[in-house]
Amino acid sequence: MPDIMSLRTVLGARALNRATLARQFLLDRADIPVLDAVAHLCGVQAQEPQEPFLGLWSRVAGFDPADLDELLTGRQVVRAHLMRRTVHLVTAADALAWRGRHDAMLRQRVLTTYKQELAGVDLDELAAAAHAVLADGEPRSMGEIARALADRWPAPGTRALGELVIAALIPTVQLPPRGLWKVKAGVRNAPVEQWLGREVDPPAPPGTDPVGADLVRRYLAAFGPAASADLRAWCGLTGLPAAVAAVRDELITFRDERGRELLDLPDAPRPDPETPAPPRFLPAFDNAILGYHDRSRIIDDADRGLSVAGARVVLVDGRVAASWTVEDDIVTVTPLRELTRTERRAVTDEGHRMAMFLSGNDTDRVQVR
């Protein structure tokens, strides 16, 4: 049962910030295999193919891009549409376990986006035809799949038709070389069962927990303490009350400064709010920010737009304090607030390490504006 005293405990923004950094391996880099890191993080946002390498470099001690490349080509991690209908890099095990639970959400989001174009399309017929197109085992682009179906369904257009098939109707993965380190390659899709040799787990039966208690535990381990609204914002799924109810007796409960109920695992790390937090360079669309409805624990409301605009950001004292870009192997940091001399030095040092990671040499190529 939850500790009654925890119900009265208010966690301020700084306490939540340090908990998030610890869960996300941003307080201290984790000395664990890359596969374990991807699993703990519940996947890595990956619609921009190179960004997962940057995010993992900032989280995993001694990260080597070749390790992630090997996991991709070895079919131990995959790129697939999952949470929020965005492309995530997840373990093969999680892709198989989670894809069915996301099925209804993925369909609804595509159908909402292309409501007019897809009106009147029989989804079962389209799915059967798409399966037949992909049955030969040949990876195809979204456009190629759509064009193969367009004679029978000409009205929706290739984009709507292709996204419906790839992102919703058929569990698919994006195949290497897409997503390999410093490789530019188009998207080639294949059904999950062809690539991994096993069908995805079926959706939860009607009347049962549609989300899965394990998904709640996994989310809290990587993102907690968090509100139910944060969990919903991360995964995009409905049916959260049943999932939370299934594990509530295992959890402890706090309040934030706004009075929201926060759920957490009893033994998960909640560091002292005054724990020093080193600068960290985050990639575009990092889930340390996007994984919450209330992102104020890590980014100011005035800067929230950066998190959805694809800006790479720098954490200083645990919070978004700058953006960063790279061009010609030069890392340029643009502060969002005035940095102290000590902060500028620390950001420059971490930026230098990022520049070396990106360029592969020891040339000092960092500027802080």
Image: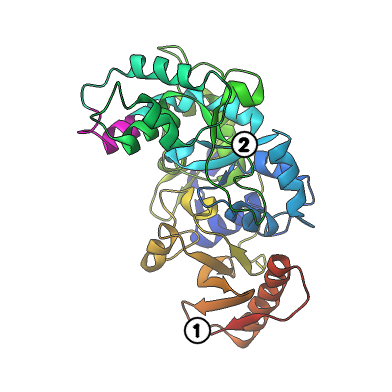
Q: Nearer the viewer, residue 130 or 368?
A: 130
Residue 323 shows up from this direction: yes
Q: Nearer the viewer, residue 308 or 65?
A: 65
Q: Amino acid at mark 2?
A: Val
Which numbered circle lies on residue 78?
A: 2
Instruction: Classify the position of the N terminus by image quarter.
Output: top right
Q: Amino acid at mark 1?
A: Glu
* Point 69% across, 33% down: residue: 75
On the image, the x and y values in percent for residue 242 come to 44, 23
Q: Look at the image and say whether residue 154 sits in the magenta stretch.
A: no
Indicate the quadrant where residue 112 lies.
top left
Q: Is residue 69 left or right of residue 250?
A: right
| Classed neighbour count for the residue bearing mark 2: other residues with Cα under 10 Å, few (<14), some (14–19), many (≥20) | many
Quick one: SS at disc 1? loop
Instruction: Check the image and report above or below for 318 versus 91.
Output: below
Instruction: Check the image and report above or below for 34 versus 163.
Output: below
* Point 68% across, 66% down: residue: 358
On the image, the x and y values in percent for residue 199 come to 58, 17
Which numbered circle lies on residue 207?
A: none
Residue 238 shows up from this direction: no
Quick one: SS at disc 2? strand
Q: Please give the range of residues in magenta.
A: 108-118
| Classed neighbour count for the residue bearing mark 1: other residues with Cα under 10 Å, few (<14), some (14–19), many (≥20) | few
* Mark 1–mark 2 distance (CA, rounded to whole Å): 40 Å
Q: Is residue 300 left or right of residue 354?
A: left
* Point 60% across, 83% down: residue: 367
Q: Nearer the viewer, residue 282 or 319?
A: 282
On the image, the x and y values in percent for residue 206 come to 40, 12
* Point 40% across, 41% down: residue: 229
Instruction: Check the image and report above or below for 351 versus 41.
Output: below
Residue corresponding to mark 1: 338
Sooner in the amino-acid sequence: mark 1 or mark 2: 2
